[in-house]
Structure formats: C-alpha cells, structure tokens
Image (cartoon, grey):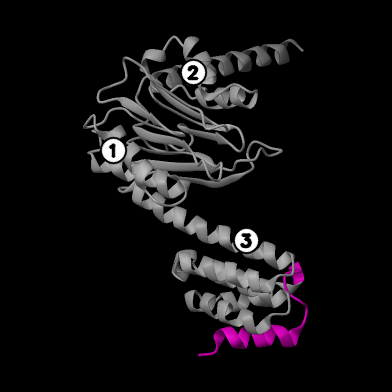
C-alpha cells in the first residue's frame, strides 16, 4: 500500500508541475496582442447579433467572438482576457445591459488598461472599452446597435471607416459586418499584416441551449486573404441554409416551396464549391418523396462532379434514405449517368 501511495504522490506532483507550466505559458501568451479589428452588431430588423473579426494571429475564432441567441454578443481583444466573452454573456443573460455588463467586468480587471472589449445586448444597447495602454493605433466607434474597434492598426482611421461601411452597406448582418472588415483592410488594417478571421451570428430568440441558434459560425484559421476566404465561406453557408430550408418544406409536404429553396441554394454557389454534396442530397430528398423526375437533374449535377455519387445511390435504401425499389434505383442511376 505504501508503494501505491508513493506512486500516487509522485503522479500528483508531476501533474502539479505540468499545470503550473501550462498556466505560465498561457500567462506569457496573454501578454501578446491577439486581435486587431472587429465589429459587434445587432440587426434592428431581424434582431440577429454577431461579431466579425480579422487578426494577424493564428486561429482568432475561438478567442475573440462570443455570442448567444437572444442574449448578446461580445468581442474581447488586444491583450485579450478571454473570460470577458462568457462572463459578459452570463451577465446579459441575467438581465444586465451591455453597458452594465462591461462596466462590471472592467471595474474588477487589474489589466483593463490593455484590454479592448465591445458588447451588444438583445435590446440593441452597446458598450465599448479601449484601455489607455492598448497599442497605437487603437480606438473604437459606437453607433446605433454596433461598435467597431481596432488596435495595432497602421492608421487611426480604421474604426471610423468600419463604422461608415457598416452603416452604408445594403444587405443582412453578415454582409454589413464583412463590409466593415473590408473597409478596415482598405485603411491599411493591422500593421503586422493578416492571418485569420471569423464571423459568429446568432438569432434573436433565446434557445434551450447556448450553442443553438447560430446562423453563422465560421473561422479561417490561417490564410493569405482571411476576409476574402471568410466571404466565400459565408456564401457557401447561405447555400446550405437554403438547403435546410428546402428540407423543411419537404417535411411539411410543400414540394413547390422546397424546389424554390433548393433552386436558390444552387444559385448561391457553383456545384464545384460543394463537391456535388448539395445537388446530390437535394436529388435524394426529392426521389424519396416520389419526385423522381425532379430529382434526376440534381443527381446528374452531382455525378458531373464525381462519378462515384452513382454508386452511393444503391447504398441508401439500407439506411432508409431511399425506397428499397430496384427499378427506381436503376432509373435514378441511369438518369444521372446519361449524357
């Protein structure tokens, strides 16, 4: 027993040393400026809220943007204190406004002088903080339902340009926030360059779980043009949102509306962008509901991307995704493979 006890103490000591080392590494990394420019915003029409950010820092997505449907959105950056994200959402979920939540956190933060944080709540209230020791050029601009903020910029015109772009761009919340990121880059952006970007947008209504209600949750970890790549992913996400909408109409038995949604989805991106995935499953959904003739054009588009989609058709009845009907399967395969 003494030997087992000594082994336990030895393992506990090792674990303590490893944890201490990990905490020191994190403490050192937290002294580095993680993010550069971001925007938090709430759409006054839809009630959607979100954050978009670009940085010369690898994988900015897990660090800066935080949002919860029906609650609010937070961007925490500069010499980042990540806990501003979840704690800010906790306070807003409990009924604090964005201003109250941010003030509470800043007042208890000994490192507030190097922080840059912005919040928006479900009521459209906005608050922002740029610490006095944030690296030049650093600042923020608060407008109706939004805040644009930046640090380590080449020029002090960045956040003003972001605000103007957000206010004057037509489109939904994603369009307007992406325009703000592009405007920042147009003013010179981060003096160090660019590496990663992210966008997180949530709905207006509270959900049963905090991870639900996300319309966009996209990240570009490392790319020479992170905002450009983020725009491409947003467009691809729009296509899949329309595909899901079409599936919903199928469940309700409204095939004309389903076909309209599917058609809109296909118009968002070329088939090559989805590797045949989108048109194939649209075709399968239609075939499974007895719309064989409507299904074949979609299946053919998938086949043109990769001939192996034809083989997959025969495997689907066992999974309950197509009727176990050999004649139907043959017609589908012949239709998708015919010239």
Q: Which residue is mark 1?
A: 161
- Where does residue 256 sit, x and y in percent of width and height? 65, 74
Q: Main secondary structure of the magenta part?
A: helix
Q: Nearer the viewer, residue 77 or 308?
A: 77
Q: Which residue is mark 2?
A: 23
Alpha carbon distance from label 2 to label 1: 38 Å
Q: Is residue 190 visible?
A: no
- Where does residue 106 sit, x and y in percent of width and height? 47, 14
Alpha carbon distance from label 3 to label 2: 45 Å
User: Residue, x 48% and y 74% (percent of image)?
Assistant: 305
Between circles 3 and 2, the one closer to the viewer is 3
**Picture quadrant of residue 56:** top left
Q: Which residue is mark 3?
A: 245
In the picture, which quadrant includes the N terminus? top right
User: Residue, x 50% and y 19% (percent of image)?
Assistant: 102
Q: Earlier in the sequence, mark 3 or mark 1?
A: 1
Q: Is residue 146 left or right of residue 291?
A: left
Q: Is residue 141 left or right of residue 69?
A: left
- Where does residue 242 sit, x and y in percent of width and height? 57, 61
Task: Say if mark 3 contacts mark 1, CB within 8 Å.
Answer: no
The span picked out in magenta is: 318-339
């Amino acid at each position: 027993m003494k030997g087992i006890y000594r082994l336990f103490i030895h393992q506990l000591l090792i674990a303590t040393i490893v944890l201490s080392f990990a905490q020191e590494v994190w403490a050192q990394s937290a002294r580095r400026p993680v993010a550069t420019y971001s925007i938090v915003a709430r759409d006054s029409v839809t009630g959607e809220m979100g954050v978009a950010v670009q940085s010369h820092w690898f994988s900015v997505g897990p660090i800066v943007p935080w949002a919860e449907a029906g609650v609010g959105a937070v961007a925490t950056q500069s010499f980042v204190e990540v806990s501003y994200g979840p704690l800010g959402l906790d306070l807003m979920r409990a009924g604090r406004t964005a201003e109250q939540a941010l003030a509470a956190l800043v007042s208890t933060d000994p490192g507030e002088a190097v922080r840059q944080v912005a919040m928006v709540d479900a009521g459209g209230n906005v608050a922002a903080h740029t610490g006095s020791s944030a690296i030049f050029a650093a600042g923020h601009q608060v407008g109706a339902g939004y805040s644009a903020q930046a640090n380590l910029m080449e020029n002090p015109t960045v956040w003003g340009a972001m605000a103007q772009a957000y206010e004057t761009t037509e489109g939904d919340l994603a369009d307007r926030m992406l325009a703000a990121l592009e405007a920042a880059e147009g003013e010179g952006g981060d003096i160090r360059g660019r590496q990663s970007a992210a966008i997180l947008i949530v709905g207006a209504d509270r959900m049963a779980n905090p991870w639900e209600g996300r319309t966009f949750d996209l990240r570009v970890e490392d790319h020479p043009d992170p905002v450009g790549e983020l725009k491409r992913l947003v467009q691809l996400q729009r296509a899949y949102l329309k595909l899901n909408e079409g599936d919903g109409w199928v469940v309700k038995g409204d095939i004309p509306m389903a076909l309209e949604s599917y058609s809109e989805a296909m118009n968002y991106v070329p088939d090559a962008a989805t590797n045949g995935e989108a048109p194939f499953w649209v075709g399968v959904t239609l075939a499974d509901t007895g719309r064989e003739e409507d299904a074949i054009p979609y299946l053919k588009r998938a086949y043109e991307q990769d001939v192996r989609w034809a083989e997959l058709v025969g495997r689907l009845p066992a999974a309950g995704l197509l009727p176990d009907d050999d004649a139907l399967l043959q017609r589908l395969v012949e239709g998708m493979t015919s010239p």
